[in-house]
Image (tube, grey):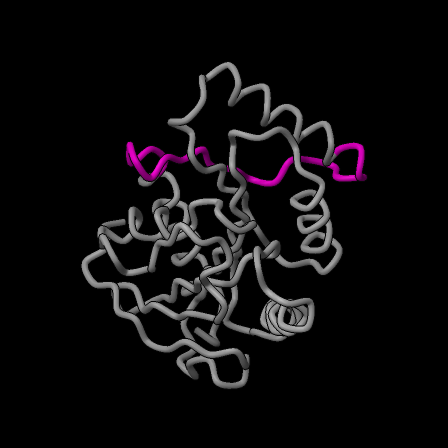
Amino acid sequence: MKINTAEFIISNSEVAKCPQDFLPEYAFIGRSNVGKSSLINMLTNHKNLAKTSGRPGKTQLINHFKINNNWFLVDLPGYGYAKVSKKTKSVFQQFITDYFETREQLVCAFVLIDIRHEAQTIDIEFMSYMGESEIPFCIIFTKADKISKTKIDSHIAAYKKQMFANNWEEMPHYFVTSATEQTGKDEVLSYIDEVNQEVFKNNSQF
């Protein structure tokens, strides 16, 4: 898939105010400072489509970007913030949950994980929530340029082990990416393209 157009549509904190267009949506979410904005900019060929920041937790709204006029990329707040109050954090978490559990247009979520670190409990717990809620998702391991191929393989193996220990029958589909080196870009976009083709062919709602 080649991305020709990527247009910011709306930011909000209420699922009811999300775009009414019935187009497939792909949501991107991960812990703070996982490199989500950089990945989105890399995938869409835009330097500043998603705002990057040295301050974790910068994304605090549901952000919709219309891609090629036929699907939405949705940039969601992280599930581990820095320097926000507990009250504010609970509000963020509630509308993230509302989005995942009520948004009919969502066809797949991408859970971003920083490959530099060994399996993190918060990531395992979030993926367990997604699995228990029957929300389709893939994993995108980010920042692959920061560590060796051996460590990448070791950390992915550790995630597989943890997930199998948490009653997963198989590892979700995953991608290894680097926004700096553009690694994984074609694989992620090809996957979205394949899913879109299936959605448009088999689902009369779209």
Instruction: Say whether residue 192 is magenta.
Output: no
Q: Quadrant of residue 71?
A: bottom left
Q: Nearer the viewer, residue 156 or 71?
A: 156
| Residue beneath the point at 68% across and 73% down | 87
Q: Position of residue 118 (x, y in %)?
A: 62, 28
| Residue beneath the point at 33% across and 59% down | 50
On the rendered image, what quadrant is the C terminus found in?
A: bottom left
With 99 as the anchor, is 23 left or right in this view?
left
Q: Position of residue 18 (x, y in %)?
A: 46, 80
Question: In the rendered image of this protein, does residue 137 appear above or below residue 163?
Answer: below
Q: Nearer the viewer, residue 104 or 41?
A: 41
Question: In the rendered image of this protein, does residue 2 appear above or below residue 152?
Answer: below
Outermost residue, left side: 4
State whether the magenta stretch is mostly helix, strand or loop.
Answer: loop
Q: Position of residue 197 (x, y in %)?
A: 38, 57
Instruction: Say whether residue 166 is magenta.
Output: yes
With 54 as the anchor, is 61 left or right in this view?
right
Count of numbered marks: 0
| Residue beneath the point at 49% across and 53% down | 56
Q: Position of residue 135 (x, y in %)?
A: 64, 59
| Residue beneath the point at 32% across and 76% down | 9
Where does the magenta region start and end?
164-184
Q: Nearer the viewer, residue 88 or 178?
A: 88
Question: In the rendered image of this protein, does residue 73 appear above or below residue 54?
Answer: below
Outermost residue, top side: 150
